[in-house]
Image (tube, helix red, strand yellow):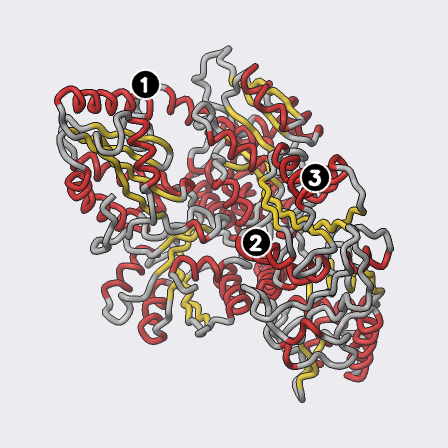
Amino acid sequence: MKLLLVDDDDILLDRLTSDLASQNYVVDAATDGLLGWEYAQAAPYDLIVLDIDLPGLDGVSLCQRLRQTGYEGPILLLTGRSSSTDKVLGLDAGADDYLVKPYTLVELSARIRALLRRPPAVNDLSLRWGSLRLDPNAGQVTVADRPVVLSPKEYGLLELFLRYPDRIFSNTVLLERLWSADEAPGEETIRTHIRRLRRKLKQAGGNDVIENVYSMGYRLRTSPPEPAETTESVPKASTHGAPQKVHQKAPQGLTGGPVSGADNAIPARTEAPTSLSTPPAPNRQAAQEQAARAAAIAAFEQFRPAIDDRLAALHQAASALRAGDLPEAVRSTACTAAHKLAGSLGLFGFMAGSHLARHLEDWLLQPNVAQGQAFAALVDQLELHLQAGPGEAVPELEPTAGASAFLPPSDRAAGDRYRVLAVDDDSAILAQLQRVLPPWGLEVVPLDDPRQVWASLEASPPDLVLLDLDMPHLSGLELCRQLRQGDRWQTLPVLFLTACRDSATVYRLYQAGADDYLPKPILEPELINRLFQRLERSRLLQTPAGTDPTTGLANRKKGTIELDLLLHLAQRYGQPFSLVRVEVAPPAHSTALLSALAKALAGQLRGGDAIACWSQSEILVGVLGTDLATTQAQLRPALESAAATAIPGLILEASIAASAVSPELYLSGATYPEDGHRLAELYQMACQRRGSPQPASPGGQPSPS
Amino acid sequence: MTIKRILIIDDEADVREIAKVSLEITRQWEVTTAASGEEGVKMASTYRPDAILLDVVMPQTDGLATLQQLSKNTGTCHIPVILLTATLRLATQQTFVAAGARAVLVKPFDPGLLGGQIEAVLGWQ
C-alpha cells in the first residue's frame, strides 16, 4: 500500500512516516500543498493524508483538485479545528474522513486501515457527474453526499441521462423508456418531470445536469461543472500559531493540473458556463465504461432465446447422462454450447456463469459418465444463476454433488497430504475452507491476521498459499510482493481469493506475483480444481532436479553451480568470462516468450557454455573466453528474431489489463575481471545495466552493455 | 482523436452486438459487423476498416481461414486483426498469433474496457 502524507509540520511528518513505514506502508511525504499535488500527479497512491492548513495550496483545495482530476482513492483530512463547517467543507471537497488534532498515531493508523478496507472505487457502480452521484444499487441520489429525494420517474430520467452520456433522448424515446404503454402521457408530462428534476437538483446545490437540445430532445450536459463552492468565505485559523494563511487560488501553470477560470468559479446559479467544456477526462471515461456495461446488461433479454437454446443443449446432455449414456452427437452439441456460453455470459455481467460454463466445457471434452450426476447439478446451478440476474452470486451447490464432479488425480498416494496456508480476515471463509479442503487430503492452516504469515511459514511450511485481497494491517498484494522478494518463497504457489475481478485488480495480482486467483464467493468444485492444478504443477516443478520445467533450461540452483564453475575456470586460466542477462517484463506474460528465448539462446551456444533460467522472467548465459560485446553480438540476432516472432501482442484473458500486452525484452551483461570477481557481483552489475527495453524487432539499436 | 472504423466478424449475434455497442459508447468509433467469414472478407475490402475483430470458431470459414484470406488480399493484408476466442489455453492462443493475428482477445471481454484494450494492442493511444 502506498500512501502520500502532506503536512507542513516536519516533526510530525517524520514521526508519521516512520510509524506508517513500520506497518508496511510505503510512504511519500510532502511539506506543502503544491508539492503534494505534484507527487499525486506523478505516482498512484492508495490513500492520501492531507493537513487542512498547508502552505502553497491548502488541504481543502488540494482535495477538491485531486477529485476533479479523477483521483478515486481515499483522502483523510487532518484538521486543527473542530468547527463543523471545516469538516463539512472538507467532506464536500471530496475527503472521505477527517481527524481533529491533537490525535494519536494509533488513532490515525486505525482510520487509515479503515479507509483502505473500503472497497475500491473500481467496484463502485454509481454514476457520477460532478458532485452528483446516483447509486443504482441503493436507488439513491446524492449531491455532494447529501441525499436528494426523487420520484421514481425523476430517478429514471436521471439514470437514463447518466448512463448514456452522449445520447439525445427525444420525448418519444423517453416515453417509451420510462412510461408503460397504458400510461401514455403527453409530452407536457415529460417537460414537467424534467423541470421538477432540475429544480430538486438545484435546490440540493447541484448544477443543471440536463441540456435542452433544440427541436431534438434532452441530453446530459457535456461536462460536469467543477464544484462551485470555494473555501474563501471560511476564515482559517492556524494550528501552529503562525500568521493566518491566505487561501491560495490554484496557481496557473501547475504541472498537470486543470488550468481554467473555473477555479475561481462563483456558485453557479444559472446554466453552466461554456468555459467548462473540457471535462475531467477520467470521470467521463468511467461514465462511458459504465454505460457500455449497462448497455450490455440491458441487451441480455434480447439474446435470451439463443442463450436458452445453448442451455437446453446442456440439459439434454445432462438427461442423457442420467439415463446412463451420452451419445457423441449430444456431447458435441453440448460442448459447443458450453464453449459459446463461456465466451458470452460474462459479456452480460454473468462472470460466474462464464466460469461455470468453462467447467462444463472441460468436463464435456473428457466426459466421465460416472460423474454425470454432478454434471447435471452444475447445469442446474448455471440455470439458477442466469435466472438470478447479472452480477448475482451463484447459488450454492449441494456440497456432495459439486465435490464429486471434479475428482482430484486418483494416482496420488494415500497419506500424501498437501498443506494449504489460508490467510483471510473473514472467519466464514476460513471455516468454509476448513470444512471443504480436508476431505481432499488438503490440510488447512487458517490464519486471520496477515502479520503472522511469516511466523506460520517457518513453523509449518505450506505447499500453497491462499490469500485474501483485502485485509487489515497488510493487504494480500503487499504480502505476496514480500513473499516474492526473497528466494525462499519465490516459487511457492500463491492463489488469491477476491471479490473484485476487474482488470485493474487482476493485473495488480499478477504483477504482485500471484499464480492464480479465485473469485469470491468460492465455488467448491472450482476451488478444488484450481488448487490441485496448481499443486500438481508445483510438484512437477520440483521433481526433475535441476531443470526448469517451463524453459527446459537448468534452474537457478543447477545454473549457479555451472556458472560458478565457468567463472572458476576463467580465473584459473586467466580467461575473460562474460555473463549475459536476458529479462522479460512483465513477468505475468513472460512464460511463453521466455521459453522461445531459451530455445533461441540455447541454439547459439557451444557445449562448454552455461545457460540457466534464473527466475520466471530471467535467463542467464555464461560464456568462457569471449568478452561481453562479442558474446552479446553473437546472441542478439537470435534473441531479437525470437522475440519478434514469439508474441507481438497477447491478451491472456480479457480481464488482464491491456497495458500488460506487450512484453518487453532487456539485454545486459557483465564481464570478469572488469566488472567483478564473483558471480553475485557480475549478476548485480548486469542488473544495474538493465536500462531500457530492447526493441523487439531487428534493426533497433540495443545498447552494448 | 480520429474516429476509428472497426469491422467485427462473429457468427454469434450477442458478441457482435455487445462489441459494437461497447465501442460506439466508449470510443464513438464506427463499427460494422459481419456474421460469417465470407461476408467479413467481402466487407473488409470495401469498407477498409482500421482494425478487424475476428471470431475463431465459426461454421464454414472459421477465423483462421478468414485470416488467411484477408492476408492474401492486397487490399486487406495491412489491416490489423485481433482474434476473439473463448479458449484460455495459452498454446492455442500462441498458434493464433503465429498465424498472423496481431493479438488474441479472450471472450468474455469487459464491454467497458474493450476499446482501451484494442487501443493498447494496436498502439492507438
Instruction: Give the amino acid at mark 3.
Output: Arg
Q: Position of residue B64 (x, y in %)?
A: 31, 55
Q: Chain of mark 3?
A: A
- Mark earlier in primary sequence (2, 3): 2
- Mark earlier in primary sequence (2, 1): 2
Instruction: Give the amino acid at mark 2.
Output: Tyr
**Front one among A442 and A625:** A625
Q: Position of residue A379 (x, y in %)?
A: 58, 40
Query: Which residue does the image show at 13% across and 24% down from the upper left?
Result: A574
Q: Which mark is residue A545?
A: 1
Query: Which residue does the image show at 64% across and 30% down from the upper left?
Result: A424
Residue ranking furthest to the bottom: A215
Q: Marks 2 and 1: which is nearer the front?
A: 2
Q: Judge the density around disc 3: few (<14), some (14-19), many (≥20) Cα neighbours within 10 Å.
A: some
- Mark earlier in primary sequence (3, 1): 3
For the residues labelled 2 and 1, the Cα–Cα distance comes to 48 Å
Residue ranking furthest to the top: A415
For the residues labelled 2 and 3, the Cα–Cα distance comes to 22 Å
**Front one among A12 and A220:** A12
